[in-house]
Image (cartoon, helix red, strand yellow):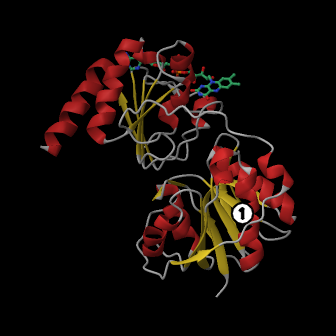
Amino acid sequence: MAEVLVYVDHVDGAVRKPTLELLTLARRVGEPVAVALGNGAEATAAVLGEHGAVKVLTADSAEFADYLVVPKVDALQAAYDAVSPVAVLVPSSTEGKEIAARLAVRIGSGIITDAVDIEAGAEGPVATQSVFAASFTTKSRVSKGTPVITVKPNSAAVEAAPAAGAVEALSVSFSDAATGTKVVSRTPRESTGRPELTEAAIVVSGGRGVNGAENFSIVEELADSLGAAVGASRAAVDAGWYPHTNQVGQTGKSVSPQLYIATGISGAIQHRAGMQTSKTIVAVNKDAEAPIFDLVDYGVVGDLFEVVPQLTAEVKARKG
Ligand code: FAD
């Protein structure tokens, strides 16, 4: 059966959820062969095997940690050369998109970024994208070379599909460019204990209606009751109420959770661009004419300072 390369996003061997989602999509197209690089690469094999990886190609070398993406591109290209896959799937993180783009250029292939679905097609995988601030859904196919496709988090369910997950060492020779840009320091972000915004199954966001940094605790309490990440509109970020790392939208992060709750957000096109592919959208806004209500599944016309604490209390009560 045809093989599909899946680039593994992991932290010291702990595989991140978007990679497991990629394995679900990869199985529609062929047999997943995972590529895990860096510290803990071999430790990823068990979980990757449980989710359908027939093989896990691993390489560990100081270059992966000490330099930016090029060593990883060298390794992914080595895997590509070894396997001759029918497609290469990469998580749509900032790093993932750069790795995918560089690989596509090197192997002379077309690339599709930020796919939200992949299905098998007679002439190769067909990727679905949500474009122009989610005004259109497009289906595309790469017509030159081996398709390289990056996939947004939360685009597929994580499914158990036991497979061999056999570890195989990948031999990588680094290009001259590999050591061109050195990492000089790493500053870990202060942990909030909440899930990563782009990977979270639930996101609760606050906008200008939250009316002050101190009031964001209302949004955070709802998020924490649901195990959600916290997002913010640009208006809230520009006002200095919440960090830019949490901004959702065209110039912020793109999220696609199972549930997106917008509080005090009007629904400007630039905000929609970052959240419109969410599976279920709920809005709380005191203006019944707010454009956000055009795209919601459930809308509450009301004052967020009354509605959101009640919602939090209800969620907590139901959890017991
Ligand atoms: P507003 O539009 O002011 O809406 C606030 C809403 O809160 C209103 O609908 C109001 O009815 C409601 N409200 C007020 N008080 C309450 C209350 N007590 N209870 C309930 N509801 C209440 N925006 C983004 O979000 N992300 C981006 O990435 C982004 N990128 C941009 C890029 C460009 C190039 C440009 C030009 C703009 C961008 N914007 C972005 C800005 C965008 O156009 C909007 O200005 C912004 O999204 C508005 O944020 P908001 O909905 O929080 O504020």
Identity, as a three-letter code, of the amino acid under mark 1: Ala
Mark 1 burial class by Cα count in 10 Å: few <14, some 14-19, many 20+? many
Q: What x and y, as percent, mark residue 236? A: 50, 18
Question: Which of 286/164 is in front?
Answer: 164
Q: In which quadrant of the rendered image does the C terminus lie?
A: top left
Q: What x and y, as percent, mark residue 285? A: 41, 24
Q: What x and y, as percent, mark residue 224? A: 30, 35
Residue occupying image coordinates x 79% and y 54%: 102
In which quadrant of the rendered view does residue 158 lie? bottom left
Judged from this view, the residue extending furthest toward the front is 62
Q: Would residue 80 appear left or right of 7 to someone viewing this image? A: right
- Label 1 C-beta lies within 8 Å of the nearest ligand 1 atom: no
Residue occupying image coordinates x 84% and y 65%: 107
Q: Would residue 271 appear left or right of 142 to someone viewing this image? A: left
Q: What x and y, as percent, mark residue 42? A: 51, 67
Tell which quarter ligand 1 is in.
Answer: top right
Number of disc labels:
1
Question: Which of 274/6 is in front?
Answer: 6
Q: In which quadrant of the rendered image does the N terminus lie?
A: bottom right
Residue occupying image coordinates x 48% and y 39%: 197
| Disc 1 secondary structure class | helix
Q: Would residue 258 appear left or right of 143 to someone viewing this image? A: left
Judged from this view, the residue extending furthest toward the left is 320
Is residue 275 in view from this perspective? yes
Is residue 136 in view from this perspective? no
